[in-house]
Image (cartoon, helix red, strand yellow):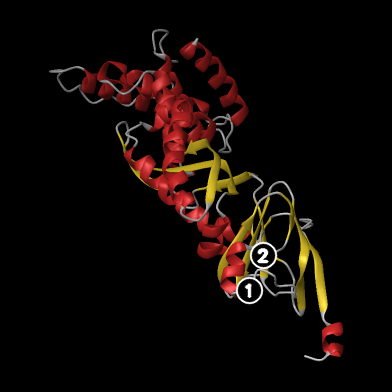
């Protein structure tokens, strides 16, 4: 090489990374036609690690500090290059910087519900959400398993891989937890600890350390949550046993009132409608009473009441009155305003 060509060569005296772009985990120093000056300076900041790579093979690794690049400070690279201990010429080598800062506030969630067995509901599908944090702990593994020779490697790149590992571990933990869904909210911290152990081992394979992991919520898909809400509401009214059936019937009637109140109607023909409503309500009440009383004989068919039938007797139950009011509204014989007023009064007496 002529002296003119040698003079034209560009040398690097200082190698450093300022981490100007957020979310970059690995960055290759732009060498191009540059060569590293013998005796040059490598500056590695806190929360960084620098790695020298020769022809795709990792040589020397440097932690935080200021390092003068000589054969003494580059022993592995010197051996790979077969340099004499007194070499004085510039050299070419790829230099990668890795960020070891904790990547905080990373969100995770199950895109599809996970089906698990549950001791209360037999088989259910659940969703889970939370947050985690991690850092690069072993740049050798991270380089060989993930980042490779790319110019930059970001946390978005690595989290595509981590997300699959995380969801698989979460599915296994939920399926094997044997914790009832209704108890999961109180055991989220314990669940997170169990999942974290398996995740830490899986992340370590890629040179990544799992810093924190938590489960923020475990929920049901919307249609299952609606069914659970209805069951909980029914339980608050008295449950489903035979001696508490009346409580559930009250709940169903109360639920039907707001829906029926959406129909249009008026007070015209109330006399005839009231007679028909009383007959239907009495028949339904008798049938329900027989169903709940073992050995009861079938009741005789109710006689149709004349249009001028008197008002309901004073001893009539609130449930029967609600049923009759519903029948009147369904027939369009009373207005929603009248119905709402009656509903409020009867429900107040029913639930106290």
Question: Could you say whether the residue bearing mark 2 is in a helix, strand or loop?
Answer: loop
- Per the image, the residue denoted by label 2 is 71
Q: Is 237 placed left or right of 148 in the picture?
A: left
Q: Position of residue 65 (x, y in %)?
A: 73, 49
**What residue sits 43% from the left and 31% below the top?**
184
Q: Is 265 placed left or right of 249 in the picture?
A: right
**What residue sits 72% from the left and 62% below the top?**
69
Q: Position of residue 15 (x, y in %)?
A: 77, 62
Query: Based on the displayed image, in which of its 4 quarters is residue 42 positioned?
Result: bottom right
**What residue sits 71% from the left and 74% below the top?**
91
Query: Based on the displayed image, in which of its 4 quarters is residue 181 positioned?
Result: top left
Residue lying furthest front: 86
How many marks the image carries: the answer is 2
- Per the image, the residue denoted by label 1 is 83
Residue 309 seen in this snapshot? no
* CB within 8 Å, label 2 to label 1: yes
Q: Nearer the viewer, residue 323 or 271?
A: 323
Residue 314 seen in this snapshot? yes
**What residue sits 49% from the left and 25% below the top?**
271
Instruction: Report the disc number at residue 154.
Output: none
Q: Position of residue 329 (x, y in %)?
A: 51, 32
Q: Nearer the viewer, residue 154 or 232?
A: 154
**CA gap, disc 2 to disc 1?**
8 Å
Q: Is residue 49 above or below residue 92?
A: above
Question: Could you say whether the residue bearing mark 1 is in a helix, strand or loop?
Answer: loop
Q: Is residue 209 above or below residue 292?
A: below
Q: Residues within 10 Å of mark 2 (few under 14, many from 20)?
A: some
Q: Is 292 placed left or right of 342 in the picture?
A: left
Q: Is residue 186 above or below residue 59?
A: above
**The N terminus lies in quadrant:** bottom right
- The numbered mark, 2 or 1, whose residue comes first in the sequence reads 2
Q: Is residue 341 above or below residue 196?
A: above
């Amino acid at each position: 090489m002529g002296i003119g060509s040698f003079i034209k060569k560009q040398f690097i005296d200082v190698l450093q990374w300022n981490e100007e772009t957020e979310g970059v985990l690995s960055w290759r120093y732009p060498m191009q036609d540059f060569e590293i000056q013998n005796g040059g300076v490598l500056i590695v900041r806190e929360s960084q690690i620098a790695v020298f790579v020769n022809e795709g093979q990792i040589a020397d690794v440097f932690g935080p500090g200021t390092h003068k690049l000589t054969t003494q400070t580059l022993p592995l690279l010197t051996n790979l290059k077969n340099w004499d201990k007194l070499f004085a010429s510039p050299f070419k080598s790829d230099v990668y910087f890795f960020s070891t800062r904790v990547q905080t506030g990373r969100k995770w969630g199950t895109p599809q519900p996970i089906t698990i067995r549950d001791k209360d509901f037999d088989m259910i599908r659940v969703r889970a959400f939370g947050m985690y944090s991690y850092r690069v702990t072993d740049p050798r593994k991270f380089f060989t398993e993930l980042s490779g020779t790319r110019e930059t490697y970001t946390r978005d790149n690595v989290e595509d891989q981590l997300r699959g590992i995380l969801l698989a571990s979460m599915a296994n933990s939920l399926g094997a937890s044997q914790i009832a869904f209704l108890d999961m909210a109180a055991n989220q911290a314990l669940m997170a600890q169990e999942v974290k152990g398996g995740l830490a081992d899986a992340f370590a394979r890629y040179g990544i350390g799992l810093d924190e992991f938590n489960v923020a919520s475990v929920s049901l898909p919307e249609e299952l949550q609606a069914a659970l809400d209805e069951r909980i509401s029914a339980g608050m009214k008295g449950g489903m046993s035979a001696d508490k059936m009346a409580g559930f019937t009250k709940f169903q009637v109360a639920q039907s009132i707001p829906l029926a109140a959406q129909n249009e109607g008026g007070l015209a023909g109330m006399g005839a409608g009231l007679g028909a409503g009383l007959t239907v309500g009495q028949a339904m009440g008798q049938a329900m009473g027989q169903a709940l009383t073992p050995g009861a004989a079938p009741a005789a068919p109710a006689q149709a009441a004349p249009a001028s039938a008197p008002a309901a007797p004073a001893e009539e139950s609130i449930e029967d009155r609600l049923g009759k009011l519903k029948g009147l509204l369904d027939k369009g014989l009373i207005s929603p305003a009248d119905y709402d007023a009656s509903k409020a009064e009867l429900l107040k007496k029913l639930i106290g």
